[in-house]
Amino acid sequence: MQALTIDLAAALGGLAYGGDYAPEQWPEEVWAQDVRLMREAGVNLVTVGVFAWALLEPVEGRYEFGWLDRVLDLLDGAAIKVDLATATASPPPWLSLAYPNSLPVDEDGRQLWPGSRQAYCPSSPDFRRAAGGLTEALATRYGSHPALVLWHVSNEYGAHVPHCYCDTSAVAFRRWLAAQYGSIEALNQAWATAFWSQCYADWAQVLPPRASPAQRNPAQLLDFYRFSNDEHLACFRAERDVLRRLTPQVPVTTNFMIAHAKWVDYRSWAGEVDVVSNDHYSLSAAAQDIAIDAALAGDISRGVSGGRPWLLMEHAPSAVNWQPRNFARPPGQLRRNSLGHVARGADSLLFFQWRASRAGAEKFHSALLPHAGTETKLWHEAVGLGQDVRQIAAIAGSRVQADVAILWDWPAWWALELDGHPSVDVTYLDQIRSWYRSLWRRNITVDAVHPEADLTAYRLVLVPSLYLISDVGAQNLADYAEQGGHLAVGHFSGIVDEHDAVRLGGYPGAFRDLLGVHTEEFFPLPQGGSVRLSNGWTATVWTELLHADDAEVMATYVDGPLPATPVVTRRARGGGAAWYVATRLDQGSLDKLLLAVADDAGVTPVGVAPPGVELVRRRHAPAGPAYLFVLNHTDQPADVAAIGPELLTGTPASGTLTVAGGGVAVVCEE
Ligand code: GLA
Ligand code: GLA
């Protein structure tokens, strides 16, 4: 995985800059202007052909490559490298007409029709055969093209059709289950089918979890989600294997949607790609929320990538067009947002997309080159960012170091948000974001890692609402605590195993011993309700009838359903401490808790800065130069301590560096 990543950086001479390029949407006269403007902006990598299947293969088995030959040659002539798509993300009309069973079916049995994109069932043998054929034809034709540096397989697997419930999927699901469980008895056991008369006598009786009169079997749902993930992954692997066979020298990726996509378990994809690449779109209008969301997505991408640099495959130059209201970026935000991704380990700044489409569903999505042309804020910012990228080229390949881990797991997210739980108000992302926000505000760098990852190097491990955990994960955390680790566990964690079966004997079953507590019963709060704590903190959503068996009580509830009951506890062990917080603290209270927990663990921030100023450091290991990123998300100038050349301006910082409101600095600390 690593060797190919480094080759890519070498081919580009630093960080990659560019984005999705769809020349097929434009008359050929426009292409020369595209390439000239790409050079003006410093673009060195473009992703070509993502949605071009219908043009590349207008009739089954008949390929038309002439136009793509000319595009790639034009780009090569301008020394612009290409991330070439396998173009299989959106089947052409002929495919669904010839193979109607390749169309996806939703949980209500409704078939989805062509007319947008991604209209295929990932288990369809016809789809896979056709996708493999196109991939083979592309690899054969372009495998040794001098512009080619990266393969881009499909696009955002599972973005629109994460799960297909058709009959083909049913057969594939049974096959997957048989491989998983070996016998129908083992399946019945894992799914607890004695409940509600669901015992299966034969594999043929098993179905995808289609819409049903009452709550569906949660273990069946979880396995179906795992199966669906694996089917998308199998589609990826099939294309990748064709590429590896024909072009072993060219790295392969597919763009993830980390922190957006609930239904793809990217941990299982990490070892399958040569380089992790991610798409990130801001879902908020507030500057700090945008920054925090991007930082979190970057930290998860880095976690998925095993700490290695990753590629930002897409982000938006300004507004998207798929939210109810699509906010354009105010001046300066693009630069801050983009360089913020680099601060978290991205070795590229790629956008959706190069030139704004004139027609089609995404015509109001921003692009580096907007409808209004080059006399625009957007274009000037695009050119400026291209210069920035060149100024900081030396950063490519360096890594981010963190003392704190936050546990992150897609199946735990799926399981937490299943039906039939004590409160619909307990959800995953908002808890992750809230805990993450507390550390972001203190400039404490966090790695987002899987519960079964090696935790020994971390001073502190955070476990917000990790409802599902495997035995291996539970043991991993127990070992970490036993060896003197510091950790903090949030409410509704450690409740079930991987089949959504409750860990008995009192909640939180997986963590009861390491925390020294047990809970008899949950007492969720009414919608909008809140509860006060004895230390002055406030909380919402959730309370528990908790006993501190072998832990110090740090706070109790003052009111709510359980006055005087413990809510925050701390168990000291082997120099470490295990904290439990049995409620959903409001942000200010959580900031205080995690400040205390981090201090307890001896965690130090990257540096000291005014509120709203983000500090992150990348370093060339082991003793190479370090790069301090200062991202000022406020509108006031900010002073931070820094020594070394500031790379974006070329001016030295010799003690105190002042970063303008909304500005960015990158200091090389040799
Ligand atoms: C109904 C059903 C029971 C059970 C309860 C739960 O009464 O008959 O089987 O599901 O609801 O409240
Ligand atoms: C995703 C897709 C792109 C485009 C953008 C728009 O990331 O991969 O093709 O639709 O969203 O934001």
Image (cartoon, rainbow, N blue to C red):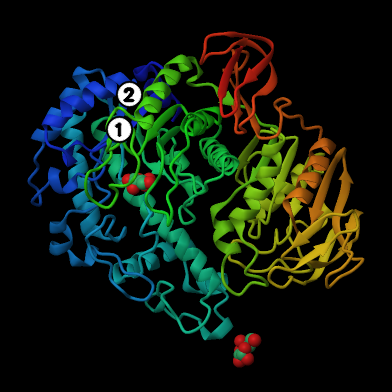
Please rate how many residues cluster around mark 1, counting C-alpha atoms within 10 Å: few if below 14, some from 14 to 19, many from 20: many
Kindly state the secondary structure of the residue where label 2 is placed. loop
Please rate how many residues cluster around mark 2, counting C-alpha atoms within 10 Å: few if below 14, some from 14 to 19, many from 20: many
- Residue 171 or 340: which is nearer the viewer? 340
Kindly state the secondary structure of the residue where label 1 is placed. loop
- Residue 326 or 298: which is nearer the viewer? 326
Question: x, y (%) of residue 600?
Answer: 84, 38
What residue lies at 51% left-to-right and 16% top-to-bottom?
648
**Kind of residue indicated by mark 1:** Leu
Q: Earlier in the sequence, mark 1 or mark 2?
A: 2
Left or right of 662: which side holds 369?
A: left
Mark 1 to mark 2 CA distance (whole Å)? 12 Å
Rendered image quadrant of residue 631: top right
- The numbered dot on residue 369 is 1
Q: Is residue 68 above or below residue 644?
A: below
Question: x, y (%) of residue 638?
Answer: 67, 24
Question: x, y (%) of residue 603?
Answer: 77, 32
Rendered image quadrant of residue 293: top right
Q: Is residue 308 above or below residue 414?
A: above
Residue 121 in sight from this viewpoint: yes
Q: Dot 2 corresponds to which residue?
A: 43
